[in-house]
Amino acid sequence: MYVCWKCNESIKELDPSFIRCPKCGSRVLFKERQPVTRDIKTD
């Protein structure tokens, strides 16, 4: 899943010949990552 940098639209599938946001037309996309779980230790 990708996210548009400009309009923050989630994009599930990309066409290899047309790599742009379908909403705003921006070419700057980044891959959305899963939230990282962290262990917090208290002493």
Image (spheres, rainbow, N blue to C red):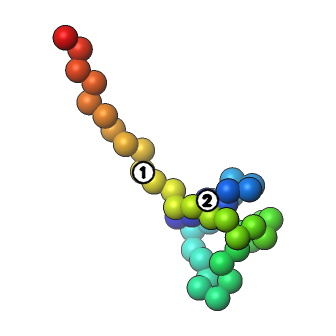
Q: Residues within 10 Å of mark 2 (few under 14, many from 20)?
A: some
Q: Amino acid at mark 2?
A: Val
The label number, if any, that marks residue 43 in the structure image: none
Name of the residue lying farthest toward the bottom = 17
Location of the C terminus (image quadrant): top left
The label number, if any, that marks residue 3 in the structure image: 2
Q: Amino acid at mark 1?
A: Gln
Name of the residue lying farthest toward the top = 43
The picture quadrant where one finds residue 23 is bottom right
The picture quadrant where one finds residue 20 is bottom right
- Residue at x 52% of width, y 61% of height: 31
- Residue at x 80% of width, y 65% of height: 24
- Numbered disc 1: secondary structure: loop
Q: Earlier in the sequence, mark 1 or mark 2?
A: 2
Q: How many marks?
A: 2
Q: Say which residue label 1 marks.
A: 34
Residue 17 is situated, as x and y percent measured from the top left of the image, at 64, 88
